[in-house]
Image: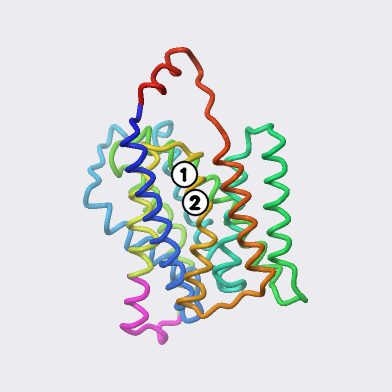
Amino acid sequence: MTTRRDRAIGAGAQVATEVSINFGSALAGLVIPVVGAPVVVAARQIVMVCAVLPFYRPRRETFVWHRLWPALALGLVLAVMNVAFYEAVDLLGLGIAATIEFLGPFALALASSRRLLDVICAACAGGGVLLLTWTDGELSPLGIGFALLAAAAWAAYILLTRRVAIDLPGLEGISIAGLVSLALVLPYALVTIDWSALNWGVIGLLFAVGVLSSAFPYTVDTFILRRITPRLYAIITSCGPAIAAGFGVLVLGESFEPHQVVAIVIVCAAAAAAIATQRDVPKSDLERTANALT
C-alpha cells in the first residue's frame, strides 16, 4: 500500500522523466538523419546497460522462465518501441510522432472503461489525431504506421514495466530487458551504420540521448510504477505530446500549422479529462478504509 507522500514523489519523478525523454527525443531528431534510427536506439541501450548492469547481481537459481519472461518480453517491446518511434520522428517530426504515439497509453487507460464521457474523449482524441495528420499529402503514411506501432508497444511497455517492477527486485528486471533490447538492435545497427559519419559531436549527442531517454527514465520508471498506478502514470503522460512539440520547436526548428497546434491540444485535453475523472473502485471494505487513511 502506498501513502500520499509516495504517490506525490512518484508523480514528481514521472514529470521529470517526461521532460527528460522528450528532450532526449529532440536531440535524437538531430542525429537520426546522420546515423539512422537503429544506431541511436543501440546507443541508448548501451548507455542504459552500462548504467544499470553494475547494480545487477544475477544468481543462477533465479534464471527460470516463469520468473524472467516479463523482463524478456519487456526487452523485445523496448526494441520495437524505440526503433519504431525514432523512424516516425525521422519521417514525421517529433511533435506529430509523439502525439500519435500517445494513443497507446491513452487507449490502455480507457481499456476497461464503459463511461459515456470516456467514449466522447476517445472520439475527440481520435478526431485530434485525424486533424493532426490531415494535410495535402505531406505526411508520410509509413511514418504514421511507425508511430502507431510505437503506440502499441508503449502500452505493452507500461503493463510489462509494472509487472517487472513488482515481481523482480531492484534493477534486475530493467537490466535483463536492456540486455535483450541491445542484443536485438545492435546487429541491425552494425549493419546499417555509416562509420564515416561518426565524430565526437555525434558520439556526444548519442551519449546524451542514451542518458536522457533511457538510463534515467527507464530506471526511474521501476521506482515510479511501484508508487503510482498505471492510470496516474497515463494522466501525467498526457502532457507528453505538448512537451514534445515544444522541444520540437526549440531544438529541431519544427513548425506547426494552426490546425496541428489545435489537434495536439485536443489530444492532450481529451486524455487528461478522460483519465483524471476516472475513479478507482475499491475491491473491499478493507481497501476503502485503507484509501481513506492514506
User: Which residue position is annotated with label 1?
Assistant: 233
Mark count: 2
Tell me if 87 is positioned left or right of 191 in this view. right
Picture disc at residue 237 = 2
Residue at 34% across, 70% down: 208
Residue at 59% across, 78% down: 255
Above or below 6: residue 282: above
- Gap between marks 1 and 2 measured at Cα: 6 Å
Rendered image quadrant of residue 59: top left
The local crowd at label 2, few if under 14, some if 14 to 19, many if 20 or more residues have their Cα within 10 Å, is many
The local crowd at label 1, few if under 14, some if 14 to 19, many if 20 or more residues have their Cα within 10 Å, is many
Above or below 275: residue 141: below
Image quarter hosting the C terminus: top left
Percent of width and height locating residue 11: 39, 45
**Residue range of the region highlighted in magenta in the rendering:** 194-207
Q: Residue 178 in magenta?
A: no
Residue at 54% across, 41% down: 276
Percent of width and height locating residue 210: 36, 65
Q: Element type at marker 1?
A: helix
Tell me if 144 is positioned left or right of 84 in this view. right
Above or below 259: residue 232: above
Percent of width and height locating residue 288: 45, 18
Image quarter hosting the N terminus: top left
Picture disc at residue 47 = none
Q: In front: 156, or 117?
A: 117
Residue at 40% across, 53% down: 15
Rendered image quadrant of residue 205: bottom left
Q: In front: 73, or 242?
A: 242
Q: Element type at marker 2?
A: helix
What type of secondary structure mainly makes up the magenta span? Answer: helix
The reply to whether the C-beta atoms of the residues labelled 1 and 2 are less than 8 Å apart is: yes
Question: The disc labelled 1 sits on which kind of residue?
Answer: Tyr
